[in-house]
Image (cartoon, rainbow, N blue to C red):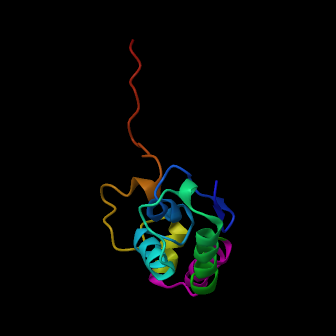
Amino acid sequence: MARIAGIDLPSGKAVAYALPYIYGIGLSTSRKILASTGVDPHKKVKDLDEKELTLIRREIEENYKIEGSLRVEVSADIKRLVEINCYRGIRHKMGLPVRGQRTHTNARTRKGPKKTSGVLKKKKA
């Protein structure tokens, strides 16, 4: 099992699809990393030798912000928006969608479970 940036990559997957398990690396970034290191993207993680793993690790450490440092930066950006009370910060604070989505219907992921109101059952006599 290959371990990069503190994450165990799934050994049965192709390298191009295993690298996105690392926070901060998506599929397109994964392909760029493999192109710059010269590693075959179709190769399985379990078939990588130590030299290829070292190349990938070095490329990621030198050129990409991932995992802990990226999470800290993202949370600091959100905290800054909330502190300056801009529109996006207010939406974050209220737990509503930030990027212009509608909220009349949908938005259940951000708003949470539906809250029903005003309906009481009548007691039978």
Q: Which secondary structure class fits the magenta region best? A: helix
Point out residue 5 in the picture as x, y percentages from the top left corner. Answer: 66, 68
**Range of the magenta residues?**
68-87
Residue closest to the eye, 115 or 81: 81
Vertical side of 43 occupied by 37: above or below: below
Residue 52 versus residue 44 in the image, above or below: below
Q: Which residue is drawn at 63% across and 80% down?
A: 58
Q: Residue furthest top?
A: 125
Task: Tell me, yes or no, whether the highlighted magenta stretch contains residue 82.
Answer: yes
Residue under the image location 63 percent in, 74 percent down: 57
Relative height, residue 25 to residue 12 (above, below): below
Q: Which of 21 and 81 is in front in this view?
A: 21
Residue situated in front as seen by the camera: 19 or 113: 19
| Visible residue check, residue 65 | no
Q: Give the image location of residue 4, x and y in percent.
A: 64, 66
For this view, does 64 lie left or right of residue 27? right
x and y, in percent, of residue 30 in the image? 46, 71
Q: Position of residue 89 (x, y in %)?
A: 52, 79
